[in-house]
Amino acid sequence: MNAEIIAVGSEMLTPYRQDTNSLYLTGKLNELGVAVAFKTIVGDKRKHLTGAVRTALGRVDIVVLSGGLGPTEDDLTREATAEALGVRLRRDPDIIAHLYTRAAARRMTIPRNNEKQADVIEGATMLPNPLGSAPGQWLDTVVGKHRKLAMLLPGPPHELKGMFEAECLPRLRDIVPKRQIVTRVLKAAMIGESLADARIAPIYTEYKDVETTILAHLGDIELRLSCSKPIAELAQTRVDDLAGKIEEELEDFIYSSQGESLEQIVLYFLEMRGATLAVAESCTGGLVAERLTSVSGSSRSFVGGAVVYSNRLKTELAGVDAQLIATHGAVSREVAIALAEGIRERCGATMGLGVTGIAGPAGGTEEKPVGLVYIAVSDADGTDVVEKRFSGDRAAVRFYASQQGLDMVRRRLM
Amino acid sequence: MNAEIIAVGSEMLTPYRQDTNSLYLTGKLNELGVAVAFKTIVGDKRKHLTGAVRTALGRVDIVVLSGGLGPTEDDLTREATAEALGVRLRRDPDIIAHLYTRAAARRMTIPRNNEKQADVIEGATMLPNPLGSAPGQWLDTVVGKHRKLAMLLPGPPHELKGMFEAECLPRLRDIVPKRQIVTRVLKAAMIGESLADARIAPIYTEYKDVETTILAHLGDIELRLSCSKPIAELAQTRVDDLAGKIEEELEDFIYSSQGESLEQIVLYFLEMRGATLAVAESCTGGLVAERLTSVSGSSRSFVGGAVVYSNRLKTELAGVDAQLIATHGAVSREVAIALAEGIRERCGATMGLGVTGIAGPAGGTEEKPVGLVYIAVSDADGTDVVEKRFSGDRAAVRFYASQQGLDMVRRRLM
């Protein structure tokens, strides 16, 4: 069985807003073994919407509509779906009573036009909406000899998710042929997408029953392995088998085998070793600290550090010798080392991380171009420093540098 | 005239990837005065794709396709479009020659299947692609007595943008009836969306010819005013007129009247006043510094500061009296003030900002719940501090706190 997701709302046809419900719905449908064949976004125009529903009923088995169930003139999903199916709407007195009771309980009056939310498509089952006023609708019908399912869901994401999980999933599980789907996520840092793919493609292409998706983002690669079988254990075995071979091939580039973020892994390793970390950041301007502290509980191993944008602060907060900066320049191997060692000592941490570079777009020279970054990690065993030339815009250079720094801390702890 | 955007590619029918080209294309089409009526996402299946193109040609004037122009078996946009139009493909020997020349210049060999990129739809004009190998196609044709435009563009965003701007925009400008569209963006900080809307809706609803869109995000509101007229000056006058009235109503909540970010405005004010800023962040963990340093040139007024996650670092890097922390707790009015004053002095900056709070989800108590944040701003005239209770998850509390801090600096500089 396959599906189409139709997002209804003119705001999603502007340059500023995107439909996001469909990502959630696609995930849930895929878990059932239902592929999404089309996604359509249509505005609040009755003719357009009716046409879109008719097209969808003609080309897929399951149509999931989101939005357009509210009380205003613009909310036309009920009318358009009924018209596409060639059936009538019936105003349900029980739902009207419920709408007024709900409003009274909140000491609100509701305008007459709200009654439109009680219009039920002929043959439909109403779906309760405990998180909002607009009820949903479920249709299990026949169009031209083919069984078709259609569901009308509210647009606000928390209402849609609540209703889909409570009302639609159990019904779909009874109808869709059973499959067990197992997914596992591996992550790798600081290896290019094409290089990683060249190394692992010969492996994963042998696993025709496991779907392998590679998502790449600035120094971070996510490998999603997914397998669907009638029995969960069979799927798990295939996924684990493939994951093991990929880990063997990519070795220590892989930092996570269960989908954790690099920040989480670094904090986990620090805690496991009873270690603490302090950072001194110049070109990343607080990004490393921000990433680490975005994880709840990070204060157990991350003590903090300094954002040393000016040379004065490199000396004042991280104890870098002013003469060293004068001799080698703020962006240098020597200053990166001094930042890592200085902040470690100043903060009394087990490990120190120092980052200095030129994020751009301004400030580059022939000798020290935009993208040049020095990153140093220091602990009781000594200090390592690397020189990197990252490409991309300011945000990309900064993210690469933060990723490289976190990855160096991880490798030091391994 | 109206348009449909069709994004081609099975990866956009997974839960992990979203089509983003359509936001760019919608913006450009809207600037021409062309409304987008539908967006469709379809996978690499010939039957589905042919059907989607046929549907689009039946319901809009302009069809913009992105993706599916590469050399592999999966790249079917040319075949499907030709089939939907009922015309043939012709393999163009000049393009084949160009493909081999391009590959030779890069000392690459190309497999035979690459010749597929030279297939031209009958009646189409080829569009050069200086940034990639797959050329695009432009069709100006008649379907059932109606003039229809269709363009086939490559999927990678930089190739699509380059081709759309160089090849499609000039052609569309010759065909689409002329309109001048003027857009202006106002931004407001730390005012709720519904409160802002309640205050300005009576104003903007009077301007029926100006489209007003409100986009809200954690303590930040964007008001987009857009007007389309035959003459640009007329549109500009209407937009400026409405912008002036909104600024009058929302007063100093408005921080930007030309779309700048809050970080940019704070840095602009600092530079204008010859002032410098240093920050000491506890619960925001570097987010304020990261936001400021994301702006190129920020080093002119932002010197840096400290991420003082542990109590020891509050004393060591920001000079907060350990006794003060012991007496009032790290999350307190007194410590926020001491952070702002201490970091200002330690860094020799004109202004200091201190943030301390409980971002959650753990660490809250009845007396000091998750979301409680103290924020202090200090300069030569003294120190202000506020107590806030932000709602939402860890990321939301942290963002609200950073926004409040930046807004307090802005107001102090005004």
Image: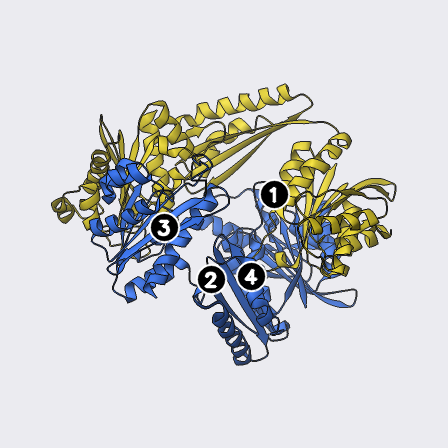
Chain colours: A blue, B yellow
**Percent position (x, y) of residue A94?**
57, 57
Amino acid on which disc 3 is placed: Ile
Q: A166 above or below B349?
A: below
Mark 4 or mark 2: which is in front? Answer: 2
Q: Are marks 4 and 2 on the same chain?
A: yes
Picture quadrant where residue B381 is located: top left
Q: Are marks 1 and 4 on the same chain?
A: no
The residue at which mark 4 appears reads as A214
Q: Are marks 3 and 1 on the same chain?
A: no
Q: How far apart are labels 2 and 3 at the CA level?
A: 19 Å
Secondary element type, mark 2:
strand
Q: How far apart are labels 4 and 3 at the CA level?
A: 28 Å
**Percent position (x, y) of residue A27?**
56, 62
Q: Is residue A51 left or right of residue B204?
A: right
Along the polypeptide, which appears first: circle 2 or circle 3?
A: 2
Residues marked 4 and 2 touching at CB (< 8 Å)? no
The residue at which mark 2 appears reads as A188
Q: Is residue B168 left or right of residue B329?
A: right
Amino acid on which disc 2 is placed: Ala
Q: Residue at x 47, y 40 (%)?
A: B216
**Badge number at residue B23:** 1
Amino acid on which disc 1 is placed: Leu
The residue at which mark 3 appears reads as A375
**Badge number at residue B316:** none
Q: How far apart are labels 3 and 1 at the CA level?
A: 37 Å
